[in-house]
Amino acid sequence: GVALATGARTFAADPYTGRVVEVDQMLRGIVAKRLAHLAAVMEAQNGILVVSSKPGQRACELRVNALLKSCLERGLKLRLVVFDEVSRDALLDYGGAEVFVNAACPRLSIDDPHVFPGPVVNASELEIALKSGLVAYEPRLALQPFV
């Protein structure tokens, strides 16, 4: 998270093994995956916008509506689904979706992308990509909450 948020040289230490590694290569993989998922979302025609009902994770209604409108104007129809607890099974219950836009906890897309049965981006990332294109993407955007 620190490397993604700051871009600073970051190390991970395992106190049990005494091993210290630089997370640079891991960070490059995460950024590459974020960009691939953003590209998939920009090309998709349908998806699910995941919103949380938990305090502190509730997305701003105005931002959600603006994002839904922007996506629709680009040909991406998103279904808004509100969850208390986001899980793969719950997402699958809502039927097929090409892509997922996460407006709940931003760490979910980074730490647990397997929860989503398809490409997933955070709402803040998509918001910037829709306005400025993928060229304006910065890794720190992946961690910005959509509140």
Image (cartoon, rainbow, N blue to C red):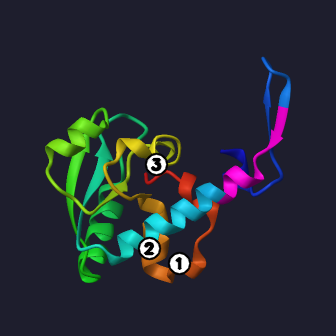
Query: Would you identify the image quadrant in which residue 29 lies?
Result: bottom right
Count of all numbered marks drawn on residues in the image: 3
CB atoms of marks 1 and 2 within 8 Å? yes
Q: Report the residue marked by disc 1.
A: 134
Mark positioned earlier in the residue sequence (3 or 2) = 2
Image height check: is 8 above or below 108? below
Cα separation, mark 1 vs mark 3, equals: 18 Å
Query: Would you identify the image quadrant in which residue 32 lies?
Result: bottom right
Point 23% across, 76% down: residue: 72
Query: Would you identify the image quadrant in which residue 71 lies?
Result: bottom left
**Which amino acid lies under the numbered mark 3 shown in the image of this protein?**
Ser
- Relative placement, left or right, of 135 versus 74 is right
Cα separation, mark 3 vs mark 2, equals: 15 Å
**Which amino acid lies under the numbered mark 2 shown in the image of this protein?**
Ala
**Are there few (<14), some (14-19), or many (20+) residues within 10 Å of tag 2?**
some
Q: x and y percent of residue 55 in the render?
A: 38, 34
Question: Helix, strand or loop at disc 1?
Answer: helix
Comparing 39 with 61, the one in front is: 39
Question: Helix, strand or loop at disc 3?
Answer: helix
Question: Helix, strand or loop at disc 2?
Answer: helix
- Relative placement, left or right, of 13 versus 48 is right
Q: Report the residue marked by disc 3.
A: 109
Q: Report the residue marked by disc 2.
A: 39
Mark positioned earlier in the residue sequence (1 or 2) = 2
Q: x and y percent of residue 77 in the render?
A: 20, 70
CB atoms of marks 3 and 2 within 8 Å? no
